[in-house]
Image (cartoon, helix red, strand yellow):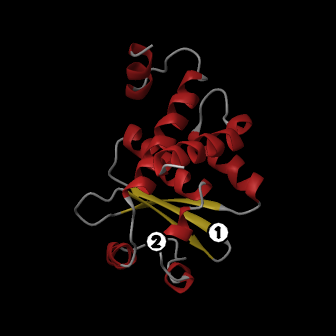
Amino acid sequence: MPKQTLARRQVRAALHSIDELIPVPWDLELLVSRIAEQRGRPIRLLATEFPVGDVSGLWMPVEGADLICYDREASPAVREQTIGHELGHLLMNHLEDRRTGPSVADQLAAVEVSPALIERFLARTAYETDIEAAAEEFGTRLLQAGHRRRGAAGSDALGRLTGSLR
């Protein structure tokens, strides 16, 4: 089976696994809480200062919790997309594909993660293009599903944009 077909199936399965958890009206933090409850493992969202570059988010499974770091300077729309993308990695269990030892992730359990530590973690992480594409597709589809269920477009920028695309 081609990698792309397998990745699409993985995205659909991950979305299906949380479909009934998507709140109406849309609330990403409530969804994260529900996913954590379903999995029996806490998920902590951490606003973080990222090093300059293309990185805007990071999922780090550590002992006793999953950390999802996002750029504290990001707009609300980018923040949601980043968290959705990282949830995709988490729900599709992409850690197995990263080729890092658990000892690296276990060292990152602090509430405040420094940019230097993020750079160190990312430097030891090998990403495959298909993995990132699958996580991005998951994040986009998740937000589309959530905002479709929102009902009337919200008054925030993301709500207005979503409403104008209907």
Q: What's the amino acid at mark 1?
A: Ala
Residue 92 - label:
none
- Left or right, residue 90 beside residue 126: right
In the image, 16 versus 110, the foreground residue is 16
Left or right: 69 as drawn, with respect to 26:
left
Q: Which residue is mark 2?
A: 112
For disc 1, the neighbor class at 10 Å (few under 14, some 14 to 19, many from 20) is: some
Mark 1 lies on a secondary structure that is strand
Name the residue: 22% across, 63% down.
52
Task: Tell me the quarter of the picture where residue 126 sits.
Answer: bottom left
Q: Is residue 30 visible?
A: no
| Foreground tag (1 vs 2) | 1
The residue where tag 1 is placed is 65
Instruction: Give x and y (percent) for residue 41.
Output: 72, 63
Q: Is residue 24 visible?
A: yes
Q: Nearer the viewer, residue 44 or 125?
A: 125
Alpha-carbon neighbours of circle 2 within 10 Å: few (<14), some, or many (≥20)?
few
Identify the amino acid type marked 2. Answer: Glu
Q: CA distance from mark 1 to mark 2?
A: 14 Å
Residue 127, by quadrant, is bottom left
**N-term mark: 1 or 2:** 1
* Label 2: which secondary element: loop
Indicate the quadrant where residue 75 lies: top left
Q: Provide residue 53's location: percent of width, then percent of height.
A: 23, 61
**Could you tell me residue 106's position as x and y percent?**
56, 81
Image spot of residue 143 (x, y percent): 51, 34
Q: Camera-side residue: 35 or 152?
A: 35
Name above or below for residue 70 compared with residue 25: below
| Identity of the residue furthest to the front in this view | 1
Q: Residue at image x 74%, y 35%?
A: 20
Residue that extends furthest to the bottom in the rendered view of this protein: 103
Vertical comparison of 6 with 121: above or below: above
